[in-house]
Image: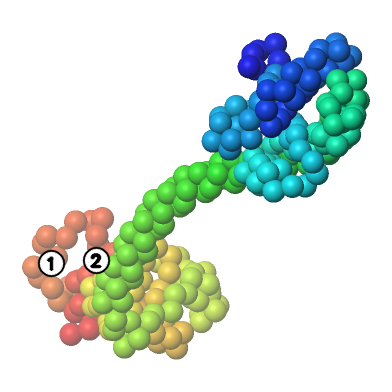
């Protein structure tokens, strides 16, 4: 009986016990002008209390009025079977419309209107509860959707982090491998003699109180004789200790003084070297003269 025009109106259906009372109710409804005055429609007047039939007809109703004589057995059965969270059930009390044991249509009008008012008030309260539940449901739905989006985002972030973690694990493994190689390569570092490095010019000045003027001859002499744990070059001298560096420089100093003082005698004694050495090397043939001195 409902149509699209009725969707914004309150839909009422009245259940009565037979055709006689159904006719009285129909006449009363037409006289009340419910739709015009109250935005209410009575879409069905059902002239039976047969449960299987009633169930089919009342689906979708906002308010159900059940005709009867108070809370009798029939009313209770219908109430329990038809009540839902989305409708309201009221009593259309026959005792209020009987005059001289006959149904009175005028009294029926008043009783229908009073029953509708009572049920509508209850229905309005029920609607408020429903709307409150709908609001809560909407909020819960929004919260759920928000959490679902956050969950999806977290899953994506977790996938990215897992990939980064895999990369970090590979990097850590590579670093560990390099560290192990380094340990193997330098496992004996503590058993090796570590050389100290000194600036050659400063150390020479400190020892002999003179400016170093012939660093090249010191380098050549050191390279020639290769003393243990002594390295000279690039303006530095490296030794196990400062004492060793000083001792070597003193040796070099003494040797160079001796070479400079006896260079002429050493040249005369070396017949082969005398013929081959050019005029440019007469004063600085360090390798041969120093070797002769050392022998």
Q: Is residue 55 left or right of residue 273?
A: right
Asked whether residue 110 appears in the rendered view, the answer is: yes
Question: What is the CA distance from the residue labelled 1 to the residue labelled 2?
Answer: 10 Å
Q: Nearer the viewer, residue 15 or 289?
A: 15
- Asked if residue 126 is positioned above or below residue 220 in the image, the reply reads above
Residue ID at (26%, 74%): 185
Q: Nearer the viewer, residue 81 or 162?
A: 81
The residue carrying mark 2 is: 285
**Residue 233 location (% of width, % of height):** 36, 66
Specify the quadrant that holds the N terminus: top right
Asked whether residue 115 appears in the rendered view, the answer is: no
Kindly check if marks 1 and 2 are in contact, taking CB atoms under 8 A apart as contact: yes
Q: Is residue 294 left or right of residue 135?
A: left
Precedes in sequence: disc 1 or disc 2 = 1
Q: Nearer the viewer, residue 93 or 127?
A: 93
**Residue 192 location (% of width, % of height):** 31, 85
Residue ID at (80%, 44%): 70
- Asked if residue 91 is positioned above or below residue 77 in the image, the reply reads above
The residue carrying mark 1 is: 273
Dividing the picture into quarters, in which one does residue 87 lie? top right
């Amino acid at each position: 009986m409902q149509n699209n025009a009725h969707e914004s109106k309150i839909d009422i259906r009245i259940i009565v016990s037979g055709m006689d009372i159904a006719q009285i109710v129909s006449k009363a409804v037409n006289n009340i002008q419910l739709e015009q005055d109250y935005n209410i429609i009575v879409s069905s007047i059902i002239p039976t209390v047969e449960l299987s039939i009633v169930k089919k007809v009342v689906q979708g109703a906002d308010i159900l009025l059940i005709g009867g004589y108070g809370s009798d057995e029939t009313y209770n059965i219908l109430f329990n079977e038809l009540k839902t969270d989305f409708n309201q059930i009221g009593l259309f009390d026959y005792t209020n419309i009987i005059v001289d044991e006959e149904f009175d249509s005028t009294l029926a009008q008043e009783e229908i209107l009073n029953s509708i008012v009572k049920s509508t008030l209850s229905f309005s309260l029920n609607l408020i509860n429903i709307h409150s539940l709908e609001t809560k449901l909407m909020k819960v739905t929004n919260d759920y959707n928000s959490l679902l989006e956050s969950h999806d985002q977290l899953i994506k972030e977790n996938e990215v982090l897992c990939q980064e973690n895999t990369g970090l694990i590979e990097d850590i493994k590579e670093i560990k491998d390099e560290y192990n190689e380094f340990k193997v390569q330098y496992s004996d570092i503590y058993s090796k003699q570590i050389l100290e490095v000194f600036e050659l010019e400063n150390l020479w000045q400190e020892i002999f109180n003179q400016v170093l003027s012939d660093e090249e001859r010191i380098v050549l002499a050191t390279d020639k004789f290769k003393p243990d744990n002594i390295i000279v070059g690039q303006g530095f001298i490296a030794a196990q200790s400062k004492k060793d560096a000083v001792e070597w420089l003193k040796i070099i100093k003494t040797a160079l003084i001796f070479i400079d003082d006896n260079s002429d005698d050493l040249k005369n004694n070396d017949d082969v070297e005398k013929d081959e050495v050019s005029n440019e090397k007469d004063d600085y043939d360090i390798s041969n003269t120093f070797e002769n001195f050392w022998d």
